[in-house]
Amino acid sequence: MITAGVDEVGRGCLAGPVVSAAVILKETADTKLLKDSKKIAFKKRIEIANHIKLHSTFAIGIASVEEILELNILQAALLSMKRAINKLSINPELVLIDGNFAPSGLKKYKTIINGDEKIKSISAASIIAKVYRDKLMIKLAKKFSNYAWERNFGYGTKAHLVALKKFGITAHHRRGFKPVHKILSN
């Protein structure tokens, strides 16, 4: 059975898009490398992502900051998942999704809470999505250097919150998220 693992990253960030990946692992993938992306050091995660890309069929789906504001973060995350699944060059017979929500319109799927720790294809999707999003935020950090996105990747760290208060928000900030909204309403 052709099974795809799906996961998203960036739901809790204050800046940047939400990114999902869908991954169908090939038998040649070294599954011992695969675990929840948050438990792998940055450089090692990039190495593992490169391995996954060589030993899988994968696709990335993105929901923009505007879509997050328009839909809400959960619906935007589900939209990014759906986009990733739809971009796969192979149609999976079963889609395994991290969490307890699934995008609408899927025929055969299963949601798995903590799936990125339990299911290797979901772990692979977690790693691919995280590396993609981290690289995107590092690229944005070059243009918006005040916010330390190359280190916090858009999450609400102390340095990011201090920078928000000092320099204001950018077009990449999620205006509807509480810390950003609070700064806007002052």
Image (tube, rainbow, N blue to C red):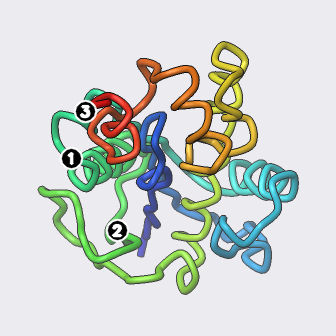
> Dot 2: what SS?
strand
Spatial separation of the CA atoms under disc 2 and disc 3: 24 Å
> Dot 1: what SS?
loop
In the picture of the structure, the residue carrying the numbered disc 3 is 67
Whether residue 132 is visible: no
The front one of 92 and 68 is 68
Give the mark nearest the N terminus, 2 or 3. 3
Q: Residues within 10 Å of mark 1 (few under 14, many from 20)?
A: some
Give the mark nearest the N terminus, 1 or 2. 1
Residue plotted at (74% across, 67% down): 28
Q: In the rendering, which numbered label is found on residue 95?
A: 2
In the picture of the structure, the residue carrying the numbered disc 1 is 72
Q: Residues within 10 Å of mark 2 (few under 14, many from 20)?
A: many
- 111 up-or-down from 147: above or below: below
Whether residue 12 is visible: yes
- The amino acid on which the numbered mark 3 sits, given as a three-letter code, is Glu
